[in-house]
Amino acid sequence: MRRHIRNFCIIAHIDHGKSTLADRLLQATGTVSARDFHDLMLDTMDIERERGITIKSTAVTMKYTSNDGDEYELNLIDTPGHVDFAYEVSRALASCEGALLVIDAAQGVEAQTVANLYKAMDQNLTIIPVINKIDLLSANILETMGEIEGELGLNVDDSVCVSAKTGEGIEDLLEAIVEKIPPPDSRDDLPLRARIFDSIYDPYRGVIVYFRVEEGSIKKGESILMMAAEKEYKVEELGHFGIKREPCLELIAGEVGYVIAGIKAVEDVKSGDTVISAENPAGTPLEGYEEVKPVVFSSIYPVSSEDYEDLSAAMERLKLNDASLTYEKVSSPGLGFGFRCGFLGLLHLEVVQERLEREFDLSLVLTAPTVRYRITLTDGSIVSIDNPVNYPDPVKIQITEEPYIKASIIMPDRYIGPVTRLILDRRGDNYKNLYVGKKRVEITADLPLGEVVYDFYDKLKSVTQGYGSFDYEITDYRPGDLVKVDILVNHEKVEALSMLVHRDRARPWAVTACKNLKNEIPRQQFKIPIQGAIGGQIISRETITALRKDVTAKCYGGDITRKRKLLEKQKAGKKRMKMVGSVAIPQKAFLAVLRRED
């Protein structure tokens, strides 16, 4: 019965205990047996376990018998906490009626807590504050309750105190979910309309679609239609999400589940698309998700040009499972054919690279990440540039503008000094601070996105000893003095290492890039100059010294001219080798360019 269905997700700042709380809920409802249980049940990727972060939203259906004796179907979606995966959170929220907002009792409300709360409020979800980690000696429950009421504006009487580690308070939380989160407001008597929120590719069964039935019902054996692709399929299997897939004969309005329909064409399935019945089609599609806006751009090329087709197929399949990834085909004279990709941040870029290399066994080269700049030309036309290769001739440029963000940083007040210096170092503007607790302060500032995407988050964690939390939203474009810095290796321009930077940053960036490349490129039989240049002007240089073979070792005594003759012969050979020799640049050298030394 629909009144016994509860659809909810867990949202929180990173490291506040979402995945551990999901584990306890799975155990408390008997969804997973003691023999099959392991920590972080819903973090299924190796990268998630290694890094200790959630990357993908994961759905699971739990059965729970409440204190009044009724059995409920609880559909849980565990979401990521890092700002780079905020699009995963927004899609999960659209499939729910309620959200558990998890707050660490030791750390209190943090930046992503506030950002996720606003997303949930935009969807009109019922929010239950969950104060986690109450078993810690450093837990301050009263102060956290004050922040929930004062900063978040939520009713503290609705909050539930739990310890996801020990299981304390989990039973109270399950009762609160049943009592406070409303059942789905969906109708069975209308034609089928279901919204796709995710999908995966199975080599044997094709695309497995994850969806929520908004209206009507779907049965095994009936024909369905993907509205965007206008393709018809027959339902082979449908069911609920357990720890393993649990097939059933029918899903009704309000339920979350999966469907297998022999879909082999990956491009036929898009997140946000509407599934309808082929026999009794609904007239209009459901409202889709907001369009994803990538902020960091990088080109991905296969190391071997023979792997291009494999990379193309891998990108299609990864796009199924990562709706925030955008890409288009590009070609480069030096690197061949590849893809220009848009990411939501540098961590998102790293995760996509690792998934392509691990899951599809590919060797890749990535160009230096950049952001999208807006350039007004002298003829009045406006172009957007996210690839340094497309940077126009400086003579034709009238105004260059760079994207700015509004950054929000929450931390203990003892770190105000180091964080302020970091913000000023990254050309921060419109700086403000506000106390949100007795010893906690929120700093807001406008920052150029180009200064943030590389290592700002890492530096913030360093200067605040891990206690600083960071969230941002893109605001507008502002004029900036941009230049294109080229890197030359052995007097040849390496297109993949070109970078668009602010003029004040050009020389420090070029010096650091040349130093890092010197440490990563292997030595050859000849000297290798590494240079940074703006147009024809060289602004930095490092030289990799040559490997020298001792050609005079075989001379025992005799006239000095014998040794000199051998050395002159070696010198001529090296000169010839330098003219024809090519320098192979390893992939780690491309990544080394991104490291900056403040």
Image (cartoon, grey):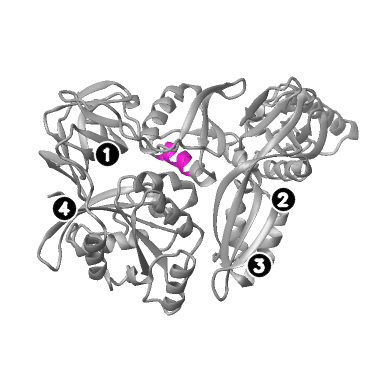
Residue nearest the viewer, comparing 195 with 268: 195
C-alpha span from label 4 to label 1: 22 Å
Which image quadrant for residue 188?
Answer: top left
The amino acid beneath tag 3 is Ile
Instruction: Kindly indicate whether the residue at mark 1 contacts the one at mark 3 (C-beta within 8 angstroms).
Output: no
C-alpha span from label 4 to label 3: 50 Å
> Which mark is drawn over residue 210?
1
Specify start and end residues of the magenta stretch as a single range. Answer: 351-358
Q: Which label's residue is closer to the chain start, 2 or 3?
A: 3
At label 2, counting other C-alpha atoms closer than 10 Å, the crowd grade (few under 14, some 14-19, many 20 or more) is few
- Judging by the rendered image, the residue that carries numbered circle 4 is 3
Which image quadrant for residue 72?
Answer: bottom left
> Would you place residue 574 above or below residue 459 in this image?
above
The amino acid beneath tag 4 is Arg
Q: Secondary structure at mark 2?
A: loop
Q: Main secondary structure of the magenta part?
A: helix
In this rendering, would 139 be left or right of 225?
right
> Which mark is drawn over residue 510?
none
Q: Which label's residue is closer to the chain start, 2 or 1?
A: 1
Q: Which label's residue is closer to the chain start, 4 or 1?
A: 4
Instruction: Kindly indicate whether the residue at mark 1 contacts the one at mark 4 (C-beta within 8 angstroms).
Output: no
> Which mark is drawn over residue 427?
2
In reply to whether residue 61 is colored magenta, the answer given is: no
Q: Which label's residue is closer to the chain start, 3 or 1?
A: 1
> Would you place residue 63 above or below residue 368 in this image?
below
At label 1, counting other C-alpha atoms closer than 10 Å, the crowd grade (few under 14, some 14-19, many 20 or more) is many
Q: Is residue 410 visible?
A: yes
